[in-house]
Amino acid sequence: MQTPAATLPAASVRDFAVVFARVQPHMQALDVFLHAQLAAFEPEIREMADYCIDTSGKRIRPALVFFSGWQAGATVSPALVQVAAVVELVHLATLVHDDIMDEAALRRSRPTAAKKYGPEAAVLLGDALFAHALHLAARFPTTEVCAAVSDSTRKVCAGEIVQTLRRRSTAITRADYDRVIDLKTAELFRVSCSLGARLGGHGDAFADDAARFGRSLGIAYQIYDDLADFFGRETRIGKTLGTDLASGKLTLPLLYLRDRLPATERAELEAELEGRVPARLAQRLAEMKAFSVFDAVHAEIEQELVCAEAALARHPGLPPCEHLAALPLVLRAQVGALR
Amino acid sequence: MQTPAATLPAASVRDFAVVFARVQPHMQALDVFLHAQLAAFEPEIREMADYCIDTSGKRIRPALVFFSGWQAGATVSPALVQVAAVVELVHLATLVHDDIMDEAALRRSRPTAAKKYGPEAAVLLGDALFAHALHLAARFPTTEVCAAVSDSTRKVCAGEIVQTLRRRSTAITRADYDRVIDLKTAELFRVSCSLGARLGGHGDAFADDAARFGRSLGIAYQIYDDLADFFGRETRIGKTLGTDLASGKLTLPLLYLRDRLPATERAELEAELEGRVPARLAQRLAEMKAFSVFDAVHAEIEQELVCAEAALARHPGLPPCEHLAALPLVLRAQVGALR
């Protein structure tokens, strides 16, 4: 087995695009497959569904499927393509619904479906995408994929609901935050790795560890995303900064800041989160810098990435591991680029 | 085989409740089953899901499952209860999302989920209910239920999308209307009958005819529902009358009225539907009466009910038929009561 370092010097693994280039034929097959699905939609929805598929972004979850199910000779397996389409459609459906919640205008620098087609149509478009995902899941010979994906979807929705219900609430603990990101992000990462490994024929023991890897990577990725909402550059991440503070979402950087602020300042931050006074992003960012919030959050991400790597370490030489191991490296580079 | 007339004089078959009393043990088992499902939801969603399950109303789709799968000795089959729960949860999910679209305040005389918990939570609650339905569908030994239900759900969503996109449009034909009700209502009636028959062990030939029965009954039921929006009594149907006219939904009674109005009046009706002038419900209702719109729509319902009955006629003596045959009778009585 080549170690990731041997394949690709860590310094050059800075971008998902570089790592995902390894699964380019798989991603092309996925694109062909997804676009072929459009024919299954009613004509009125086809254009809307097409729009969503095109704005989908990085396709991290399909990459997790392809890497976890990696087979000798880099074979593009139709089963893996189909399950990649399932998890991606579930993800796209949740994005469509999220953007309604957030009243977001842009996603990856393009108008959101909710903005372009109206929130009503977007609710139903999300439903149709989700239903189609489950329809594809049901085409496998056994109920395994359908059961796993519907269970994950329920968890993703639960995470989103809990987050929505707690918006503008400051009675949120670290445990609450952990639970929400586990449900809303880590779950779909987990199931992508687990199903990929299983359909790739790598056995139960690896599938379980691939699931652990996916879950830890998902947690790390969501914390990174929450950190980028403060420390990112708009042009780079393709969305407005400071939306979590403005919309009253108590993410990890804000939890750390709140814990470190003196009582008076803390009460003011809570008033901003609760929407009683306007959010002061620049000041909060300056305070985050003063109180080393970045480093604290960075340490948390690192801890999860170490867990992710530990799950792979139990399977030396297994083809998927080489590729999966590149993903924590990419995420480290991305976090490093925020600083 | 007892004919429905022998079991129950047609004159007394006026209400779904009377016919559904035959499946009371099944419905009780369904209630127990549905409430047991709440434990699977995250605590924050449990109360919301419980609220939706309680406001569910008539449970027509589960009744279709139980009647289509009817077995000697009126056995309550766990498989039928589970599939009844699946179709009912899909239906409840679509109601939750519909009420967001319609900005409806009341459903069966209680606040809608969108009103009670906010539209954001309602979007996600609908998703979670739907995901749970598919999760239950995936628990069957084969992928048949999951495939059928996910396909139906996609069609239901498509019907709702098309209807939403065409709201306030007067460029709607009779073919458009037929297609929307086929997708948004008849499809779930159809799959309820088809899966009930199949899981009840009644064979492919009957399952196909049960599907035809369900589809025709669903079309008839939706046309009845659209007629009741004008000719119903609010206390009886539990919702505000005239909402289709007010919200610009060109249903069959309005299509008939439009065709029969002289040009000037027709232009005025179109202005109301397009939201350019306030809707005049009382006048439109008077015109519907003057132009015998009720009778014309009634004839359409009757035509579908005859088709539904013809599908059953091919299976004389089969236990499900006796019970299914009561449903067109009920619907006839309900339509008659509107006049």
Image (cartoon, coloured by chain):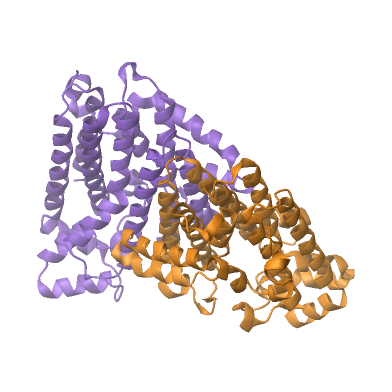
Chain colours: A orange, B purple
Image mark count: 0
Note whether residue A145 is visible: yes
A220 sits left or right of A267 in the view: left
Residue at 24% x, 34% y is B327
Q: Position of residue B239 (x, y in %)?
A: 37, 51
Considering depth in this image, is B90 or A59 the residue closer to the camera?
A: A59
Q: Quadrant of residue A224?
A: bottom right
B292 sits left or right of B73 in the view: left
Q: Which residue, as the protein is rendered here, is positioned at the far top?
A: B73
Query: Is A252 placed above or below B215 here?
Result: below
Considering depth in this image, is B62 or A144 the residue closer to the camera?
A: A144
A177 sits left or right of B338 in the view: right
Residue at 39% x, 39% y is B145
- Screen quadrant of the N terminus of chain A: bottom right
Q: Position of residue B87 (x, y in %)?
A: 39, 41
Residue at 43% x, 75% y is A116
Query: Is B129 placed above or below A295 here?
Result: above
Q: Position of residue B111 (x, y in %)?
A: 48, 51
Note whether residue A275 is visible: no
Considering depth in this image, is B331 or A302 the residue closer to the camera?
A: A302
Considering depth in this image, is B90 or B271 the residue closer to the camera?
A: B90
Residue at 20% x, 36% y is B209
Query: Is A284 placed above or below A310 here?
Result: below
Q: Position of residue A161 (x, y in %)?
A: 59, 55
Q: Which residue, as the protein is rendered here, is positioned at the far right?
A: A262
- Screen quadrant of the C terminus of chain A: bottom right
